[in-house]
């Protein structure tokens, strides 16, 4: 795909579609880091077989040092495998054809501190070969999307870590990628930013994009991933859909309006008669994330200002496939 | 992206300073004028260079990915204040050096000193800037892993390196141009109101050395054959050394005889006269000057010796000191159909120990006016820009596989080796071959090679000196001959060493700084040579090395 448009598979007749290649395919991949004398030092990835289908959100999970980031760097051509083969979007990792269709957010944003937010996005747009008008339009839309339209003219070195992370996310999206690789995307983000990253991932999935997410914050991944792979010591320990992996067939949870003591007693008695044990019954507490988001929204509705990120906007029109809307935004 | 340059307030300040200094210059021709001119030079230089960088960055904003990387490199240098500091050092240094040798010194000597130091200063500052900018930027990006975000874009690693190089090379070119402008203005200012001699200073000359007499070839051969017949012991020893090859042994004898002839030709004993012929290139209006700097057998500081110089039908006595350079204007009619003949007679009477030898650099030459100072400065700057662009390429490529301090050290070492390459050239056998060997090589070579050999001598003229030196010292037997059997390993090492030295020699061959200071014309061939050898060959090889290394360089480290 060129940097601006993705072929819309939904418009192609089923029979005419080529057999779908996986977005990522790793077979028997091993990565050994060697010392100066070429002696094996660390085996970061061992015999990894991985197949990520197009259009899915795939979570690569594991504790620190489990080989998640190494795997991602292998997919991007930043590292070369010691053994095994890797195909990304049907091509060689790191080849220009593949990279033009990939977006990448590294673990730390790694931005040019002397450029401002808008210059940063325009620069990365140029590296994708976008024409000046298009890259300017996309830069503005992305700044709006990540909630940094006012901070766009400030040098990145003045940004907080969360703001840098937002610009990092924006640069990963500037080419409207087919495959988006996010390494610890919520690292350093406040709950607002975290929520937004999740929303972006879900919106991209809606558009048929493939997203690979690594994280050790499992709650973040659980909400957005179709499938997850759990790594430990460079090898895959578990692979499956989130539902498959997390469903507990031995238990049932009911979420009801508050019961008065009499009704609660009747329910307990009924369940007791049938030999069903109640492990937990309590009034639920509000989620801390919801509480935080409520407070921030209230503050904003009262007109309080901040030099940091403001409320994120909707998905950038060019990412949502609404090019004509985007044209007027530039 | 907006085109970067110095911060606007600094630009405005420079403009204000330039306007005030300019006004003072116009109003006051007195004692403060020189200070005002120095301020004008500093402020104007800052302003012009800043605007130049702005224009370059703006033009890069219209290019592709390479231009994008170059533009960001320039922004980094500007916004991290590296450029501002470099500009201050550059133009501050030029402004200060204007006062060098002021007061008592002759105008010509003052200008020569100013040019030598100012150009050396400019090259030093820009070399350090280039070293820092080329290695620093990429090393930091690799260390901070910022490069991870860039190389995963579809730019290609080579284009990334090319962009980094282009950014630094373009800034170098702009700064060098601005500095050359400042130097030229300083020279114009110094020459303002100068007399006729001062005005003729604007001309540059080409130094021409005497031609070797053709007859020496035949004469050396007959002497060699004579020696073979008269000294059978020597002949047997040579034959053993040459493994029975009679022709090689005879050539050894001929070389020795040739050297003796040259030594005799370069030496004028008391009461004797020598005739020297020169081939004169196409020239500008102006006098042809004979430069004499003999080595005198009995010379000491106060000892001067009389010589009579005959040329163009005139005989002129000159008194020469040992180790001193004396210039003598020759009559215009001395040049006939592109040739000039000078006869020099050692006019000391009755003192047999007072011989004179014309050996080594500039001992006997004529200076022919061939161009202008400004054109020469432009040529020098072209050569310096090519050298700086090579430093930039080397810096960028070193940074692909070395950390910052080591990469900088490597570049410095290569710079040092290249700068010393000219000195090594004197020891290099290929270049130090006698005219005899070159004549034989030229005779055996195809037509175009013959032309090249001749052209080379004509342009640079250094070979003559090497030979004369060898002739004077009577050194024998150090010429390299490929017929000598050596082990293959030694032969490869020998060839590689000579090739390396020959390659390194390209760095100093044009002698841009020295030539401008001494108003010696930098030949077009030297500029073309620098462009081809340093600009294309060296830089290309370094770029290729960078491509090979960086293409497979893993940009992430173990993190498990």
Image (cartoon, coloured by chain):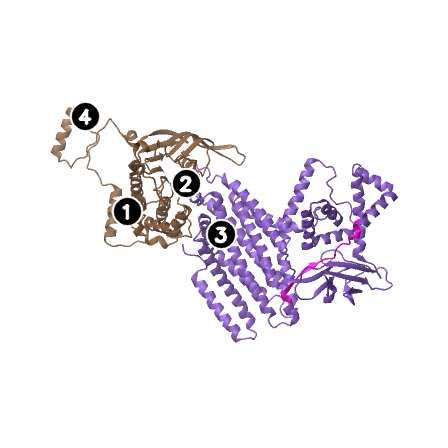
Chain colours: A brown, B purple
Residue under pointer 2: A99
Taking the image as shown, residue A174 lies to the left or right of residue B411, namely: left
State which chain disc 2 sits on: A
Front disc: 4 or 1: 1
- What is the x, y in percent for residue B173? 53, 56
Q: Is residue B208 above or below residue A229?
A: below
Q: Are marks 3 and 2 on the same chain?
A: no
Front disc: 3 or 4: 3
Q: Are marks 4 and 2 on the same chain?
A: yes
Residue under pointer 4: A276
Query: Residue B517's quadrant in the figure?
Result: bottom right
- What is the x, y in percent for residue B241? 79, 39
- What is the x, y in percent for residue A120? 39, 50
Closest to the observer, A246 or B49: B49
Range drawn in magenta: B201-217
Mark 3–mark 4 Cα distance, whole angstroms, equals 75 Å
Residue located at (16% from left, 24% from top): A274
Mark 4–mark 2 Cα distance, whole angstroms, equals 56 Å
Residue under pointer 3: B167
Q: Secondary structure at mark 1?
A: loop
Q: Is residue B325 visible to the viewer in this orientation of the structure?
A: no
State which chain disc 1 sits on: A
Residue under pointer 1: A314
State yes or no: discs 3 and 2 in contact (Cβ < 8 Å). Answer: no
Q: Secondary structure at mark 4?
A: loop
Taking the image as shown, residue A272 lies to the left or right of residue B438, namely: left
Closest to the observer, B236 or B122: B236
Taking the image as shown, residue A248 lies to the left or right of residue B372, namely: left
Report if residue B215 lies within the magenta region.
Answer: yes
């Amino acid at each position: 795909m060129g940097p601006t448009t993705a072929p819309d598979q939904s418009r192609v007749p089923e029979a005419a579609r080529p057999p779908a290649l996986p977005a990522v395919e790793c077979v028997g991949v091993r990565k050994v880091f060697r010392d100066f004398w070429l002696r094996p030092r660390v085996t970061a990835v061992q015999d990894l077989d991985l197949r990520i289908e197009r259009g899915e959100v795939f979570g690569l999970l594991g504790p620190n040092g489990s080989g998640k980031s190494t795997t991602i760097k292998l997919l991007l051509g930043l590292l070369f495998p010691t053994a095994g083969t890797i195909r990304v979007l049907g091509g060689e990792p790191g080849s220009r054809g593949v990279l033009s269709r990939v977006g990448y957010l590294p673990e730390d944003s790694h931005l040019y501190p002397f450029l401002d937010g808008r210059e940063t996005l325009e620069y990365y747009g140029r590296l994708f070969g976008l024409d000046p008008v298009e890259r300017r339009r996309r830069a503005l839309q992305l700044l709006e999307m990540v909630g940094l339209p006012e901070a766009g003219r400030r040098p990145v070195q003045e940004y907080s870590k969360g703001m840098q992370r937002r610009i990092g996310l924006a640069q990963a999206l500037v080419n409207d990628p087919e495959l988006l690789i996010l390494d610890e995307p919520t690292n350093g983000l406040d709950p607002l930013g975290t929520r937004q990253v999740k929303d972006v991932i879900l919106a991209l999935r809606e558009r048929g994009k493939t997203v690979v997410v690594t994280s050790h914050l499992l709650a973040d991944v659980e909400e957005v991933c179709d499938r997850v792979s759990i790594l430990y010591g460079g090898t895959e320990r578990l692979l499956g859909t989130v539902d498959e992996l997390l469903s507990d067939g031995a238990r049932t949870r009911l979420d009801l309006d508050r019961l008065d003591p009499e009704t609660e007693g009747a329910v307990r008695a009924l369940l007791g008669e049938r030999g069903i044990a109640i492990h937990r019954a309590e009034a639920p507490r509000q989620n801390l994330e919801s509480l935080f988001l409520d407070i921030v929204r209230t503050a904003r509705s009262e007109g309080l200002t901040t030099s940091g990120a403001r409320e994120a906007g909707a998905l950038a029109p060019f990412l949502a496939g609404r090019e004509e809307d985007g044209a007027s935004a530039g | 992206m907006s085109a970067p340059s110095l911060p606007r307030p600094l630009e405005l300040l420079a403009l204000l300073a330039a306007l005030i200094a300019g006004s003072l210059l116009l109003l006051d021709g007195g004692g403060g004028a020189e200070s005002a001119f120095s301020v004008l030079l500093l402020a104007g230089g800052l302003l012009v260079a800043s605007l130049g960088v702005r224009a370059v960055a703006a033009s890069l904003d219209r290019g592709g990915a390479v231009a994008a990387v170059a533009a960001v490199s320039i922004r980094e240098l500007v916004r991290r204040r590296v450029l501002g500091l470099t500009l201050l050092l550059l133009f501050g240094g030029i402004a200060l050096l204007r006062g060098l040798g002021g007061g008592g010194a002759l105008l010509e000597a003052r200008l020569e000193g100013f040019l030598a130091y100012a150009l050396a200063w400019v090259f030093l500052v820009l070399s350090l800037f280039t070293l820092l900018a080329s290695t620093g930027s990429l090393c930091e990006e690799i260390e901070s892993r910022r490069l991870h975000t860039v190389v995963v874009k579809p730019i290609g690693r080579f284009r990334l390196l090319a962009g980094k190089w282009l950014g630094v090379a373009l800034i170098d070119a702009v700064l060098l141009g601005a500095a050359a402008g400042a130097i030229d203005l300083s020279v114009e200012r110094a020459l303002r109101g100068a007399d006729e001699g001062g005005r003729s200073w604007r001309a540059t000359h080409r130094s021409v050395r005497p031609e070797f007499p053709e007859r020496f070839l035949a004469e050396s051969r007959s002497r060699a054959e004579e020696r073979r017949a008269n000294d059978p012991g020597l002949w047997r020893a040579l034959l053993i050394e040459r493994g029975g090859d009679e022709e090689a042994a005879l050539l050894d004898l001929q070389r020795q005889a040739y050297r003796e002839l040259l030594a005799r030709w370069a030496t004028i004993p008391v009461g004797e006269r020598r005739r020297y012929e020169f081939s004169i290139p196409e020239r500008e209006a102006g006098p042809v000057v004979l430069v004499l700097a003999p080595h005198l057998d009995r010379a000491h500081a106060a000892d001067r010796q009389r010589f009579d110089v005959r040329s163009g039908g005139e005989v002129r006595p000159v008194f020469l000191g040992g180790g001193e350079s004396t210039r003598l204007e020759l009559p215009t009619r001395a040049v006939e159909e592109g040739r000039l003949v000078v006869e020099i007679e050692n006019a000391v009477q009755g003192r047999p120990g007072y011989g004179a030898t014309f050996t080594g650099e500039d001992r006997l030459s004529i200076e022919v006016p061939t161009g202008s100072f400004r054109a020469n400065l432009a040529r020098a700057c072209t050569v310096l820009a090519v050298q700086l662009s090579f430093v930039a390429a080397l810096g960028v490529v070193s940074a692909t596989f070395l950390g910052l301090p080591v990469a900088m050290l490597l570049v410095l070492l290569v710079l040092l080796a290249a700068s010393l390459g000219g000195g090594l050239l004197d020891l290099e056998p290929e270049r130090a071959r006698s005219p005899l060997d070159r004549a034989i090589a030229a005779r055996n070579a195809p037509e175009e090679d013959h032309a090249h050999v001749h052209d080379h001598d004509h342009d640079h003229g250094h070979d003559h000196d090497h030979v004369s030196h060898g002739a004077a010292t009577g050194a024998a037997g150090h010429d390299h001959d490929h017929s000598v059997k050596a082990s293959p390993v030694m032969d490869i090492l020998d060839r590689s060493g000579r090739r390396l030295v020959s390659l390194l020699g390209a760095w100093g061959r044009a002698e841009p700084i020295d030539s401008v200071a001494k108003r010696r014309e930098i030949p077009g061939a030297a500029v073309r040579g620098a462009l081809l050898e340093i600009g294309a060959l060296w830089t290309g090889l370094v770029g290729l090395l960078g491509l090979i290394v960086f293409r497979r360089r893993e940009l992430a480290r173990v993190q498990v």
